Image (cartoon, rainbow, N blue to C red):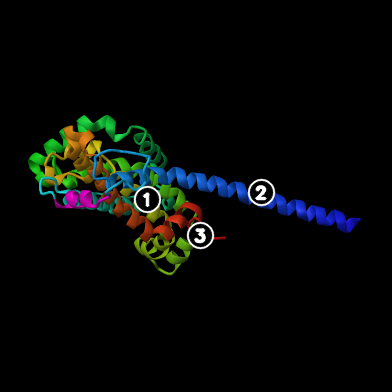
Amino acid sequence: MSETLSKKKVGSLQAQRRFNIAWRLVVALLAILFSLFPVVLIFSTSINPVSQVTVTQLIPENATLNNFRRMLGDPQFPFARWVWNSIKVSGLTSLFVVGLTSLAAFSFSRFRFRLRQPLLRTILLVQVFPNILAVTALFLILLNIGRIYPGFGLNSHFGLILVYLGGAMGFNTWLMKGFFDTIPRELDEAAYIDGASSWYTFTRVIFPLVRPILAVIFILTFIGTYADYLLARVILTDKNMYTVAVGLSLFIGEQYSQRWNLFAAGALMAALPTLILFYLIQNQLQSGLTVGAVKG
């Protein structure tokens, strides 16, 4: 009797386990289909010789790659230059953000100084107001800076980078400070006892432990600046200086309804740098989002 009840209990647990696995797989499959549908639609449009968006055919009739060739070969629209401009601006912005925020976070996490808490609150308060509210002020500031240092004024990539830095420092400093706080202070104290300076402790002891959060901040900053349109459109005025978001928006221009296929081809090629970056740092990115600085 007891053996029969035990077998029934085991069978019930196995059935419940299979049910849990099944519904999780269904949810995962629906999520994958939901996320891939726009990509499939864009790809189908990009190989369509006719400029139209359709959901009835995955592979349109007379599918062609001419749209990609036209995007890369049209001298009137320097698409490759736009992509390179976006990579340069986003890459430099991400590097500067990672470097500056890591120094700021280390200082706020490890040192105790006057006005420490008010400064942290001020940084957080400033982040409440997005850059879009200061577009006019930023335009005038860069206009005046450009009169003295043209390389940091309007229609310059470094001027755009300065604007992005101002908008990304606050939140990322708080995010990285919380990560630094999880690292035991005993590591710092042991390094100081051995005669290490604060800089040596930061670069050789602490920095290797925070690589996951550095990867997270780098990729988030890169994506945010790579896809930005408004600030880049206001600051950049020369066609050869455009980022890819601005370039694609102006590429379609008044012929928006007639160039769906070219726009889709450009959008797919413009997404490649971000996909490659995700692939290269996926391990660090996963650790930064889930594990933390130290284990145990």
Q: Which residues, given as a range, are shown in magenta?
A: 63-73
In which quarter of the view is residue 207 placed?
Answer: bottom left
Q: What element carries label 3?
A: loop
Q: Is residue 189 left or right of residue 196?
A: right
Q: Does the magenta stretch include residue 68?
A: yes
Q: In which quarter of the image is the C terminus?
A: bottom right
- Residue 294 is marked as 3
Residue 87: x percent and y percent?
A: 24, 52
Indicate the quadrant where residue 153 lies: top left
State the residue position of label 1. 217
Disc 2 marks which residue?
19
In this view, the mark in front (3 or 2): 2
Q: Between disc 3 and disc 2, whose residue precedes?
A: 2
Q: Between marks 3 and 1, how big is the CA–CA gap?
A: 18 Å
Q: Earlier in the sequence, mark 3 or mark 1?
A: 1
Structural distance between the alpha carbons of marks 2 and 1 = 38 Å
Q: Is mark 2 on a helix, strand or loop?
A: helix
Q: Which amino acid does label 1 sit on?
A: Ile
Relative vertical location of residue 241 with respect to residue 189 in this rendering, above or below: above
